[in-house]
Image (cartoon, rainbow, N blue to C red):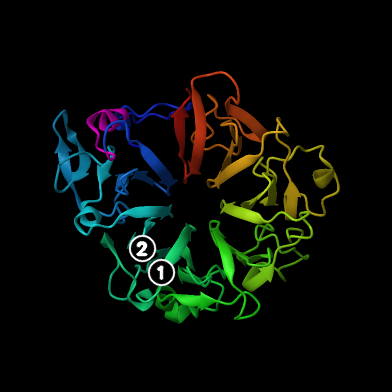
Amino acid sequence: MGTDFEEEVDKLRRNHYIDQLIEKGAFGGKDAGLESIAAGGMHSLLLDENGTIWTCGSNDEAALGRVTRKVTDPLDKNYGRTVDDLTSIPTTVPVAVQSLVYDGFRTVRIAAGDSVSAAIDAHGQLRIWGTFRAASGVIGISKGTLYQYHPSPIPELGAHKFVSAAAGNNHLVLLTTHGEVYTLGVGEVGQLGRRVIERRRISGTVPEKVVLGSRKRKAVVVGAGGDHSFAVDDQGNVWGWGLNSLGQTGTGKRSGNADLIVQLPKIVIGLSKADLGGATVVEIAGGSFHTLFLTSDGRVYACGKSDEGELGIAYDDRAFVDRDYPNCLPHPELISFPDADDPVVHVSCGTHSNMAVTQAGALYAWGRQVCSELGLGHDRDVHTPAVVVRREGGSWSAVLPSCGGQHSLVLLRKKN
């Protein structure tokens, strides 16, 4: 999280390192700040107004996009710490990814998975780094490279330009300027939208195009959960695929194991343009076993694992009372927020936690907590959206949330 504090942080806390960098003009000039954030498994990406990516957190599997080394802590000889190889700054502190700076790579989009990171620049160029890990171990992000420490292009996609990237635990979903969807990474449970033979699992690191029912159909939005993936086509249909053990793809679930894995893209139930009264899904975020869908008019729908507050739906809600399964909702249901007149503009999912930001700058959080990642000042599970940052009053407005493995980031703006 970019902090020297090693204890659990149970409330939103300003990052004084970020404040210092803003004061120094490090993010693009006087008072320039951050534009975007992405929380991964145990690392974080921060994008400044100059298009530079700053990273912090664990670099055990090259997720930071820079080389680090272990040194002895000068204050405790029995304790080691990891520092940046160039600057000797600890990895708990955000440091710029210099190789991208040297290349003149001005980033506009970022994504972070367990130990993989991705960036897209203003010209649609893609860079990725880190690694993918399958059940059998590390498979790398390209043939012959287990750990990619510096951002690198994908040779097979060199001719393509990209507008968006979504990261699951160990896979990426990529959207080109022509509306094509490509996936790469681990494909053990269908998250790549194609069949990957176990004995040739390395083939998953070679990107391939995903077909949404017809090769003529174009995509406009992509999303990902832990081991599941999504795309919205140009007609407003939402497609899901991957692990569906608890209905997290939203494509329905039958008894037994018939729908345990959705190998190829399948339409998500109840989220078509007609179903939504003319609205469309504009953002999709997923946790380990649940998913959130944000519509163009600010509504949020949820599906998947439901027994620990992941879906944000009260237990006395009709959707719960009438559900067919005791621990999940296999198709999306509407979440109710305290202020119905304040539409949601961004959503994010952690492993079992969630955050949502509204048009007026309110921040809500709900779900299961492991390390107080909801920022509510306690570690109890929360079953419906709870206010973290108020819509009215206070000094700050929420702009963008990002939930990681066991930590959360929130971009805030000071109110006038």
Q: Main secondary structure of the magenta part?
A: helix
**CB-based contact (under 8 Å), mark 1 and mark 2:** yes
* Residue 20 covered by magenta stretch: yes
Residue 204 image-quadrant placement: bottom left
Q: Amino acid at mark 1?
A: Lys
Q: Residue at x 47, y 58 (%)?
A: 167
Image vertical order of residue 272 relative to residue 157, above or below: above
User: Which is nearer the eye, 388 or 47?
Assistant: 47
Position of residue 26 measured from the top left corner of the image (x, y, whole percent): 24, 37
Write the residue at 25% across / 56% down.
Answer: 100
| Lower position in the chain sequence, tag 1 or tag 2 | 2
Q: Position of residue 370 (x, y in %)?
A: 52, 38
C-alpha gap between disc 1 and disc 2: 7 Å
Is residue 352 visible to the viewer in this orientation of the structure? no
Q: Is residue 60 left or right of residue 215?
A: left
Which amino acid type corresponds to the residue marked 2 in the rendered image? His
**Residue at numbered disc 2:** 123
Name the residue beneath numbered marker 1.
Answer: 161
In this orientation, which residue lies closer to the viewer: 184 or 234?
A: 234
Nearer to us in this view, 152 or 351: 152
Which residue is pictured at 54% across the width and 79% down the height? 195
Q: Could you tell whether 158 is left or right of 351 in the image?
A: left
Relative height, residue 262 to residue 103 (above, below) = below
**Residue bounds of the magenta highlight:** 19-28
Residue 7 falls within the magenta-colored stretch: no
Q: Is residue 357 above or below residue 133?
A: above
